[in-house]
Amino acid sequence: MRVTKKEGRFAWVMSGGLARQVNIQMVPRVRLGDYVIVHAGFAIQIVNPQAARQTLSLLNEIK
Amino acid sequence: MKYIDEFRSKKAVEHIARRIFEIMPKGTTNIMEVCGTHTQNFHRFGLDRLIPENLNLIAGPGCPVCVSDQDYIDRAIQLSKQRNTVILTFGDMLKVPGTNSSLQKQRAEGSDVRVVYSAWDALSIAEKNPNKSIVFLAVGFETTAPTLALTLQAAKKANLHNLFFFSALKLIPPAMEALVSDRKLKIDGFLCPGHVSTIIGSRAYEFIPKEYRIACCVAGFEPLDILEGIYLLLYQIVQKKPRVENQYVRAVKRNGNPKAKTIINEVFRTINTSWRGLGKIPQSGLRIRDKFSNFDAEKAISIRIKHRSANKKQRGCRCGDVLRGIIKPSQCSLFGRTCTPLNPYGPCMVSSEGACNAHYRYK
């Protein structure tokens, strides 16, 4: 879910065209545009885009 | 990148499935996944049809509702009968059968039982109902624990005196240790949970390959994640070099989320606790610390069970054996006959993350 707005302890995230408010106290360094993993209304981790690309490219190495 | 489509690519899934067949060792290999969402997605995406027959994927105790023991359910039901009490719970708990009733039945009989999406919802409900006791059924693993801890801290700050948490929170690594110590089970590898690991980090499993020589791989939830996780586990098994691998690097770090771990530690302490099917496991549960005892339902409200000895198991239900991977859901005599998602006998059929439920819906 992509962060579109920050408001103190909360942020607005977009998921499938829907906007939702989530608590961001566990990811205080989150920035606008970051993707976050959300569990029961709380962002629990910021997704690392470089690492995601690494996972996909690793797949091509498995031969 | 949207982090979904890329990890559902048919071409990539077929590629990794072929590689799995190529390196699959002879004989049976047992891989246990300890995460309800892995169980669900494995069947939902039909991945069971893409792996070799001698690869036995066992659904472990990764569904929080399923592992909550009968005594906890009975006490929650008892609480719901008390006057001026509102029970808050995540949806799956409603239908779990207690010894004589369920929260759903109590609700039909007039108890105030409400389903919430987030622990945070409890704050506004407590504010709007100052004359009622609001009891949150705190069920879950390391992923849910910090959400409850933050809510409890916020309740304290807001000076709420009518919100209580009834904790059955559990920790995954001690349960995994209990499983590998069980000689009946021959687990060759663990597919470690994704979201729990975002909190505790891949480091939390390092004792497993070190002390028990069992392979571990943290994996995400998309089809590609799950299959790649299985491939990486098989590779370790074939090489006979068990270690903790992290397939889900986009969300899981070796140390997890230190902020979330601190929050958990501020509010909870570890205790010995009972798991359905696994019995009592040392230091595998979380209890609210004494300094927050005003919010601890077990201390602040007296929870009485009239007939504690009436705590009998559902006749014929083998949920406990399913949770330990001793039998597959279809090997239980109730499965699909008298026990279905509409009329569940045990919690493994109730929860959408339960092994029986997933087998029933997608097979």
Image (spheres, rainbow, N blue to C red):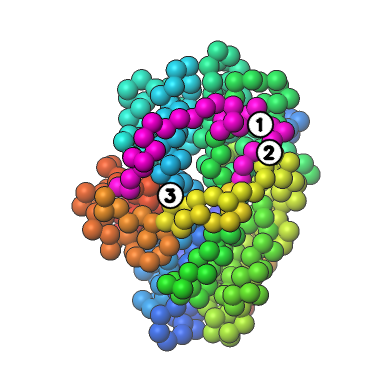
Residue B312 shown in magenta? yes
Q: Which amino acid does label 2 sit on?
A: Arg
Crowd rating for badge 1 (residues with CA inside 10 Å; few <14, some 14–19, many 20+): some
Amino acid tagged 3: Cys
Q: Which of the pair B131/B196 is nearer the observer?
A: B131
Span of residues in magenta: B286-314
Q: Which residue was labeled with disc 1?
A: B293
Q: Nearer the viewer, mark 3 or mark 2?
A: 2
Q: Which chain carries label 2?
A: B
Q: Mark 3 lies on which chain?
A: B
- B244 in relation to A52, above or below: below
Spatial CA span between label 2 and label 1: 7 Å
Instruction: Report x, y in % for residue A11.
Output: 69, 35
As drawn, is B29 to the left or to the right of B334?
Answer: right
What residue would you read off at disc 2? B289
Q: Under tag 1, what secondary structure?
A: helix
In whole angstroms, how far apart are the C-alphas of marks 3 and 2? 25 Å
Label 2 crowd (10 A; few <14 / some 14-19 / many >=20)? some
Q: Distance between the residues labelled 1 and 3?
A: 27 Å
